[in-house]
Structures are given as C-alpha cells and as structure tokens.
C-alpha cells in the first residue's frame, strides 16, 4: 500500500514545474555556497602550512645569523637585547587545529583568532599579530558560510515545497476524491512530506559532499554527522510544513504562519535568549580600566620585582649589577601578563558557558542547534576555543621560562638554544556532537508525534 | 483615480493580513528598538565612565620617564550616533576602544562580534535588519495576490468591463500600498525618536532621519512593484508567492553574502602578521626611495651636531633622545600613513565591488545607505580614526618636545623626571562627528542604486500592467 502511494506522490511531485525550478534554484545556491566554503577551508589549511613554513624560514635565518656573525665584540646589553627581540617577536604561530568539518564554519573562524603569537611581554595589552585584518562592512553583511546559509535557506526551501499541499487540493476538489478513495487520507499527505524530506536531504547531501570534498582536512565522520544534523533539521521544517497544512486556513495564510515561525525561531528567539544572559557578561570596556590598574601597580613594583627575580635565581652569577631596558622590564612584563591574563580568559570562559546554555534551547530554535553542531564539527566551538586559549597560555609560560634567563643573565642566544625551543601542542578532543544531535532529533520526533496526533484533520475533504 | 486609490486603501485596511502583519512587525520592532536602546544607553554610560577612569589614570601616573608615560597611552572611544539605535551598521565589527601610544598607530580593539553567540551569524535582529530584510517579506505577504486574486475572483473582468484601464488599477494599488507603508514608516521613525533615542533631535539628525525615510520608501517601492508585477504576470497566486519568496531570499540572504565573498576575494587583505611585519620592515629599511632608518638617524644626528657646533650628542643643549624620537616618529607616521592608506584603498575597492553587486540586490544598497545615514559605516569610522590619529600625534609630539626642552644630551630611559603636571597638560580628546552633508556625499551612489531599482521595478510593473488581460 505504501509503495504505490509513494510512487504516485513522487510522480505528482516530479511533474510539478514549480517544484522543479524551486529545487533547481536552491540547489544552485547550495552548490555555490558549498564550493566557496570548501575552497575557503582549503585556503585556510594552506595558509596554516605557509605560516608554519614562514616561521621555520625565519628561524633558519636567525640561526645562520647566529652562526655567521663573530660574536666576540658583542656587548652584554646587545646579547640581552637580541635575545629579547627574538623572545618578543620570534615565537612560532600557535595555531588552533581545526577539525574535519571546517568547511561548515569558515566565517566564524575568521572572527576568532585562530593563531596566536606568544611573547615575553604582555600579549593582552598588545596582541596585534594575532588580530584578524578584515573589512567590517563585509563582516557586517556576513560572508558565504555553509552552515549559516543552510540554517537560513533550508527552512525556506521546505516552506516553498510544502506550500498548499492540502489546501490547494481541497480548493480544486482533488482532496475530496482522495478521501473517498483512501479512507486514511493523511497517509497521502505523509507520503508527500516524506518525498519532500528526501529531496531536501539530497539538496543538502550533494553540496555538502562538494564542500567536504574540496577541504583536504575534511573527514567522513564529520560529513556523516553533518548530514545527520541536516536530516534532523530538514525533518523539523518539513513536519512543520505538514502541520501548517493541517491548519484550517488558506495556503497563503499557512505559508505566512510558517514564515513567522521561521523569523521567530531564527532571529527573535535566539536574540531574546542571548539578551537575557548579557547582564552577566564580563565587560571588555571595564577590562581596559582593570588592565591599566595592573600596569600602574606593576610599574610601582618594578624595582622590587626585578630584585625578587634575581633573588629567586641566585644560583647563577649575574654579569652586571645595574640593569636597563629590556632586562629591567622583564619581571614586570611577566607579572603584568600573568595578572592581565586572568581578566581576559574570563571572556572565553563566559562564551563557552553561554553557548552551552543557548545550545540547550535548540529544542525550540533549531538553527541554534544546527550552528552549534557545525561549530563543534569545525572545531571552533566556544568550549574548545577556551581550551585552546588555555593551551596557548601554558605555551607562553614555557616560552617565557625558556627565554627569560637568556635575557636576564645577558647570555643571548646560541644556535643550540634555537634548536631546543618549546613547541606548541594542543591535543584537545573535539567537543562531542552527540547531545546536540539528540536534541535536534528529539524536536523532530516531538513534531512528528504532534502531526500524528492531529492527522485526522487531513482525513476530511 | 482618487476613487480608485481610496478603494485600494480601504481594501488594504479591510484585509486582516495587513493589520496582523503591521502589528506583528511593530511588536518585534519595538522589542528590537528597546533592546537596541538599552544596549546603547548601557554602552554610553560605560564608555563615559571608562573614559573618565582611564583619563584619571593617565593624569595621575606620578613621577615617570616622559616616554614611558607616553607608552602607558590613552584610550579614546567613539561616541555613538543617535541613529545607531536603528542601524548599528559596522559597530559590532570594529573595536570599542582605540589605544593611542607612541611610534605606532593601532586598530580599534575589543570587537563585540568576537564575543557574540553563533546565531548572530544568521543576522542580528536589529531594527535595520528587520526593516531591510524582514519587512520586504511581509510586503510580499500582503501584495503577492493583489492582482491574481482579483483575476481569480472575477473582479478584474468586471473592472475591465467597466472600462477601467488595467494599468490605472495597478498604479492605484501601488500608490495605496506605498502610502500605507509611508504612514507606517513615519509613525515608526517618530516613535523611535520620542521613545528610544536618548538625545533630543537636532537639525542634523532630522535631516539624516528624513533621508533615511526616503531611502526606505524607495526600497519598499521596489518590493511593492515587484510583488505586484509577479501578481500581474502569473495566473496563480501560488506561483507568484513562491517566485517572490525565492527572489526575496536571493536579494536579502544570498546576494549580499555572495557580494561580500566576491569583494573579499577580489581584493584580498593582508594578514595582521603581514601588515605589521611590512610596517616594521619599511620603518627599519625605509620606504621605496628612502634611506634606511639607521642612515636617516645618522644623517639627522650629524646635522644636529653641526648646527649646534658640538662633537658629541652628550653635549647637545637639548635632550637628544627626545629629538631623535620626534624624528623617528615622524618617519614612523609616514610609514604608517602609507600602509593604512593602502589598507583603506583595499577597503574602498571592496566597497566598490559591493556596490556593483548591489545591481543584483536592492537590499545591499539599502543596507549601505542606511548605515551611512545612521553614521555607522566605514566613512564615519574612518573620520573618527583620522581624528584619533591626529590626537595621538599631538600627545606624543607634546611630550617629546617637553622632554627635549627639559633635558640635555643623553638621558636614561629608567630616570623618572616627568610628573602629573605634564600628563595633565595634555588636552582631552574632543571628537566632532561629521555632519549630514558628509553622510550625503558618502551615500549618494547607494541612493542612486535604490532609485535605479525602484524605477526599474515600477517600469516593469507598468509594462506588465499594460498587457494585463482579465
């Protein structure tokens, strides 16, 4: 019984020219989106390799400089200054290792700082090399981003495909015939919804394959997880389309109702939820004043900090008794950086907590859930980024511990020192997508149950 | 024509959809305006407070080396334009504070977008977003069957039989829809000023608001005309509605992002690492045609020794470190200006590419026009940054000149011979935002595009109206 029903509905769906051009238009947009996102992800990975290579070249240049120049005439101050300049500007890029689903979140990646340069001064006060140079106008518009455009356009596609499924047949009298020949007429509606879900899923799976295929770092697991999320997301909107068909209103009115649901769940509800939590957010502006309090405070303590550092490292002979910049500033930079770091880490910690809180609302706002899954698959979710920021801090401590004595004891750098530089390692596991996926599918199942509960409305002519 | 117009207005008013949609949008807009206003108010309060605290910190540095005091730096903050309540434009994507320090020009820091939750990538539900992206959808919602319904119900045939030219009917429908929208918009803008904007409106703000209203009306005219054209062209309301929804999705969601991506790919920006490394390189080795900094400084010092008739810098009658810094910073300013202008030209090229893309989406032109009139676009941002840069140079020049005048020969960087008197002698930063004429000059290409779109859409509607048969 189901098979001929599906075949008949498929024939009806296929023969409708409106369905064909809507699918063609959206598929074209999705393919463009996929190609662009895949290419951007590919470029990002190439850029990461190029950055690492550029640093190795710079290091080689430094090493050959240290080997080639006779150092006999170099003063202690020059040695300390050379080591300081390298310690300040010469760290390797500490890159955020993105995951197999990077193609899903290329725009979000640009907003973050996916690469950090540790230093022996205060990175929090001056982090210019870790900034991202962008055009704010383009950012405000938003660039092509696979997950974002999917979250925006997939519901529109579903709304278009489900338009007037029941109402138009009722208006033309076809539905009266259907209810006469098929007592469980709702199954006809169910079959047409199922066909539409499969078609929408295909419109997602094909472009996704292209996007993931273009990214050399993409993984099959990430692709399958994304398709599972997309399938749940599409199911939600298709079932909502079916529910709208059951409403005792015209096709136009039910489409308007669906668009209203889309506006509320995509824009209004997420904004309301995040505004509610904003009061607890730490303030970047207040952090400026706090940072300057630290700077003034540490400036006061600078001589004491210098004396304290040499007292703590008294087992090594200091070749000079009075010190000038940069040596005299090193303990101050360390203290300033450690204290300022605590202020700035609060922002990453807050983002992680807030995003996790918002993700729980995916049950009523599916786009939140889909974007959350996309970020996790790309490896750029707030929780993972917070872990990355902590790992960078840890790396900075090791970098500082390794190079500071070479500055403070006026030793300078040797080629052997450059060979043993600390390296950055971030081995954090991806944030699991299991729960967000379950949440998305629970929403779909709840809607499905609602549809089944009200299915009898479809049985009337 | 007056009778026809009044019939159409009454038809719109009697149609429950319009009332529902208008009220629903007003409620959402009121919520967005309220949230935006609260945010603006809180940010203004916090900015004023932090501005006061940071200035106090600057003024009370106590005994310090003047150059180290200068390195402590001053933060300046961009005041919010009143209309940013409606359209925050690029504000979330530029920093909130600019750190002014010697030797280097900085970008603004602490971009709110970095801390924003993931869903903001879908579009921030600001009043401008609702007016530019969502309202056209609602226009489609009540105009898509304006003609096709008359055809389906047979009233079109009756009107045709009564001798009414179809084009007159369509023009009346367009005028009625636009009239209702104009009244709605005037009401909204008035309420915004009375309830949500903190500052009382001055002449400049009213001019900007009026221009903004004109821009929105042209934009809505485009959508009304397109919706009526689709309703005229297609025999079934369903086809008209689905076509219009797809067109809207392309205009509001796809083409702007595509344009942004194309503009970004067409004129790639350097990475921050490349940008600052290039500045450092050009500063040390000289811009093309210039000597290296070391050679320039050596020449400068030799000239100073010769002019003052001494053989060693230690014997100069002024602080050579400060004078050397003034010389080096002047060159640093030249290098920074060179690179920042190059970056500015890249931004301009990207903006121009976006303007070309606006030929495929009126939404893009409207977004640009709205942000410019609201004072939250790149042109206004650059105006502020130029003023801040001039102030940065003033601070550092003032301090270095004081240092040069109050020391002799070479002084130690670890000596602390400046005090609060010097810090307090630095005048506070006073920024005067540009006037409405500035905004007009920056916005006219976008207005022209909107005019082009509305003319094209109206012409299309009239052509289709002339061919309309019952």
Image: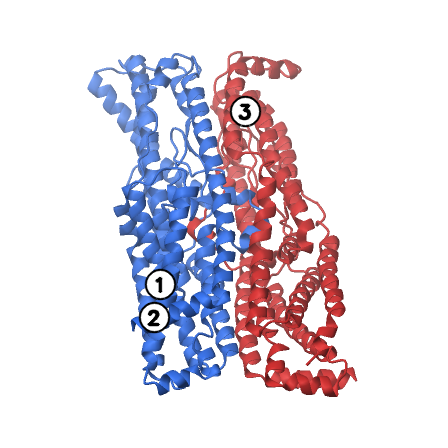
Chain colours: A red, B blue
* x 69%, y 59%: residue: A222
Residue B330 is marked as none
Asked whether A433 or A240 is in front, the reply is: A240
- On the image, which quarter does residue A216 sit in? bottom right
The reply to whether dot 2 and dot 1 touch (C-beta < 8 Å) is: yes
Chain ID, mark 3: A
Image check: A24 left or right of A205?
left
Label 2 vs label 1, nearer the camera: 2
Indicate whether B43 appears above or below A238.
Answer: above
Chain ID, mark 2: B
Indicate whether B194 appears above or below B326.
Answer: below
Label 3 environment density (alpha carbons within 10 Å; few <14, some 14–19, many ≥20): many
* Residue at the disc numbered 3: A333
Cα gap from disc 1 to disc 3, whole angstroms: 65 Å
Residue B5 is marked as 2
For the N terminus of chain A, give its image quadrant: bottom right
Labels 1 and 3 positioned on one and the same chain: no
* x 64%, y 86%: residue: A174
Residue with the most extreme right position: A1
Asked whether A423 or B43 is in front, the reply is: B43
* Residue at the disc numbered 1: B179
* x 52%, y 45%: residue: B113
């Amino acid at each position: 019984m189901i098979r001929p029903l599906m075949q008949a509905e498929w024939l009806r769906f296929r023969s409708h020219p409106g369905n064909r051009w809507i699918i063609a238009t959206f598929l074209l947009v999705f393919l463009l989106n996929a190609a662009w996102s895949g290419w951007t992800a590919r470029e990002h990975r190439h850029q990461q390799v190029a950055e690492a290579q550029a640093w190795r070249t710079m290091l080689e240049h430094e090493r050959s400089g240290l080997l080639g120049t006779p150092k006999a005439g170099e003063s202690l101050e020059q040695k300390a200054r050379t080591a300081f300049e390298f310690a300040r500007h010469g760290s390797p890029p500490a890159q955020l290792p993105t995951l197999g689903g990077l193609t899903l979140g290329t725009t979000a990646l640009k907003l973050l700082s996916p690469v950090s340069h540790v230093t022996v001064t205060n990175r929090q006060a001056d982090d210019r090399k870790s900034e991202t140079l962008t055009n704010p106008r383009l950012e405000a518009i938003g660039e092509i981003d696979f997950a974002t455009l999917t979250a925006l356009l997939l519901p529109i596609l579903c709304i278009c495909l489900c338009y007037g499924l029941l109402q138009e047949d009722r208006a033309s009298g076809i539905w009266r015939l259907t209810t006469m020949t098929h007592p469980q007429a709702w199954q006809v509606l169910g079959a047409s919804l199922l066909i539409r879900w499969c078609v929408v899923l295909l419109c997602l799976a094909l472009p996704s394959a292209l996007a993931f295929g273009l990214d050399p770092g993409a993984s099959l697991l990430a692709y399958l997880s994304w398709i599972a999320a997309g399938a749940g997301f599409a199911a939600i909107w298709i079932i909502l389309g079916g529910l709208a068909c059951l409403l005792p209103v015209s096709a136009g009115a039910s489409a308007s109702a669906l668009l209203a649901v889309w506006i509320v769940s995509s824009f209004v509800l997420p904004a309301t939820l995040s505004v509610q939590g904003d009061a607890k957010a730490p303030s970047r502006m207040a952090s400026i004043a706090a940072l300057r309090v630290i700077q003034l405070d540490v400036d006061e303590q600078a001589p004491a900090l210098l004396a304290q550092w040499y007292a703590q490292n008294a087992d090594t002979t200091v070749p000079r008794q009075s010190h000038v910049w940069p040596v005299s500033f090193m303990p101050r930079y360390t203290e300033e950086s450690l204290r300022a770091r605590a202020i700035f880490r609060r922002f990453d910690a807050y983002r992680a907590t807030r995003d996790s809180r918002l993700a729980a609302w995916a049950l009523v706002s599916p786009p939140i859930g889909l974007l959350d899954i996309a970020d996790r698959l790309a490896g750029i979710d707030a929780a993972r980024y917070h872990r990355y920021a902590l790992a960078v801090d840890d790396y900075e401590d090791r970098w500082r511990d390794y190079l500071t004595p070479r500055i403070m004891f006026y030793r300078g750098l040797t080629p052997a020192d450059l060979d043993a530089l600390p390296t950055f390692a971030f081995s954090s596991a991806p944030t699991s997508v299991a729960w967000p996926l379950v949440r998305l599918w629970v929403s779909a199942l709840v809607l499905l149950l609602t549809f089944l509960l009200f299915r009898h409305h479809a049985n009337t002519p | 024509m007056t009778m026809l117009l009044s019939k159409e207005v009454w038809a719109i008013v009697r149609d429950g959809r319009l009332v529902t949609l208008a009220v629903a949008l007003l409620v959402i807009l009121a919520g967005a305006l309220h949230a935006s206003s609260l945010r603006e108010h809180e940010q203004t309060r916090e900015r004023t407070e932090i501005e006061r605290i940071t200035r106090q910190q600057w003024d009370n540095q106590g005994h310090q080396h003047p150059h180290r005091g200068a390195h402590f730096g001053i933060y300046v903050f961009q005041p919010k334009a009143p209309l940013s309540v409606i359209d925050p434009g690029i504000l979330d994507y530029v920093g909130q504070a600019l750190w002014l320090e010697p030797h280097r020009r900085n970008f603004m820091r602490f971009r709110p977008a970095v801390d924003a939750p993931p869903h903001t990538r879908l579009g921030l539900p600001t009043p401008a977003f609702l007016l530019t992206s969502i309202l056209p959808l609602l226009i489609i919602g009540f105009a898509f069957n304006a003609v096709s319904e008359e055809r389906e119900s047979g009233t079109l045939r009756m009107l045709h039989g009564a001798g009414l030219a179809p084009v007159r009917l369509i023009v009346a429908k367009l005028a009625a829809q636009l009239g209702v929208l104009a009244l709605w918009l005037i009401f909204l803008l008035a309420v915004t000023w009375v309830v949500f904007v903190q500052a009382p409106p001055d002449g400049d703000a009213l001019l900007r608001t009026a221009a903004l209203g004109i821009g929105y009306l042209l934009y809505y005219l485009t959508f009304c005309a397109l919706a009526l054209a689709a309703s005229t062209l297609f025999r079934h309301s369903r086809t008209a509605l689905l076509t219009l929804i797809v067109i809207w999705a392309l205009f509001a969601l796809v083409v702007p992002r595509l344009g942004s991506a194309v503009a970004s790919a067409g004129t790639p920006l350097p990475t921050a690492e490349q940008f600052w490394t290039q500045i450092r390189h050009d500063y040390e080795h000289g811009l093309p045609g210039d000597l290296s900094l070391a050679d320039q400084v050596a020449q400068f010092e030799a000239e100073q020794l010769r002019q003052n008739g001494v053989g060693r810098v230690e014997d100069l009658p002024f602080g050579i470190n400060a004078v050397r810094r003034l010389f080096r910073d002047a060159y640093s300013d030249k290098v920074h200006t060179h690179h920042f202008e190059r970056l500015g030209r890249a931004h301009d090229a990207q903006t121009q590419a976006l303007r070309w893309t606006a030929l495929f989406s009126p939404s893009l032109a409207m977004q640009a026009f709205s942000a410019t009139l609201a004072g939250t676009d790149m042109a206004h941002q650059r105006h502020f940054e130029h003023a801040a840069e001039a102030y940065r140079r003033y601070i550092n020049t003032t301090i270095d000149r004081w240092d040069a005048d109050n020391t002799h020969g070479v002084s130690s960087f670890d000596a602390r011979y400046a005090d609060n008197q010097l810090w307090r002698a630095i005048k506070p930063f006073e920024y005067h935002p540009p006037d409405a004429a500035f905004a007009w000059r920056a916005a006219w290409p976008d207005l022209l595009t909107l005019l082009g779109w509305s003319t094209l859409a109206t012409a299309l509607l009239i052509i289709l109206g002339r061919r309309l048969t019952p």
